[in-house]
Amino acid sequence: MRPYLFVAGLAVLLIVAVCAPFYLVVGSDSVVSREAKDWSEFAAYAGGLLGPGLAFISILLVLYTIERRDREGTKRDLLANVEKADDAVSHWLQRSLPASSGAPKEYGDVVWGLVDTHAIDASHLRRADERLLELVCYYSQTVALYRDNIDHHFVYQYHHDRAAALIYYLEERASTLQQMAGPSLATCRTILQAPR
């Protein structure tokens, strides 16, 4: 909104800058002419001075519109990346893992604490956790990029909280993961908690 006010102010200033000298030269003592020739001369004068200025203002508005459209496109692309990462995590959490005994369990139930980790075959759980670690690192980065380019709102907060919860789960399981899991998770947490 601010650029539009600036341009409107510039247009008013331009009109005043054109009309004020004419008024000062002709003066307030002059009678308003009823002759078409006089009005034609005034219109030619005003059009000659205002035309280029208003054309310049319209170019500024077109450039501002293009820049704003590009910024919105970037935001849309960043959101698409966040949603793609979120879909990959969601898909991974829907996987069935063999249970130590009984029917297979959904991996998401383990992550969200609905099924105890001891109820799942340890080797399958470790592989699932390692893949989740990779996905969560990517997810955290996309959420952080999204945060840096938008105003905070519900979509960002949802993804931020989800990524933080997944990091917390993996931190609890870090001792069963690869050696670099701890530093990777610390980096993910730092990325999410970084100020704007």
Image (cartoon, grey):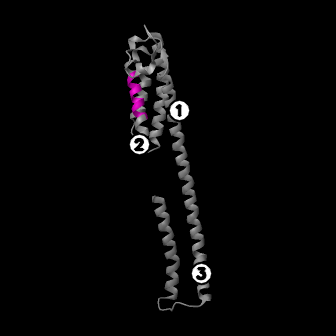
| Marks 2/1: CA–CA distance | 19 Å
Per the image, the residue denoted by label 2 is 153
| Marks 3/1: CA–CA distance | 59 Å
Give the SS element for disc 1.
Answer: helix
Q: Which of 154 and 27 is in front in this view?
A: 154
Q: Residue shown at 43%/28% (left/top)? A: 187
User: Which circle marks residue 84 in the picture?
Assistant: 1
Q: Comparing marks 3 and 1, which lies closer to the viewer?
A: 1
User: Which circle marks residue 187 in the picture?
Assistant: none
Categorize mark 1 by other alpha carbons within 10 Å: few (<14), some (14-19), many (20+). Answer: some
Per the image, the residue denoted by label 3 is 43
Categorize mark 3 by other alpha carbons within 10 Å: few (<14), some (14-19), many (20+). Answer: few
Q: Mark 2 or mark 1: name the one nearer the start of the chain.
A: 1
Q: Residue shown at 42%/23% (left/top)? A: 183
| Three-letter amino acid code at the position of disc 1 | Lys
| x then y, percent, for residue 96 | 49, 17
| Marks 3/2: CA–CA distance | 51 Å
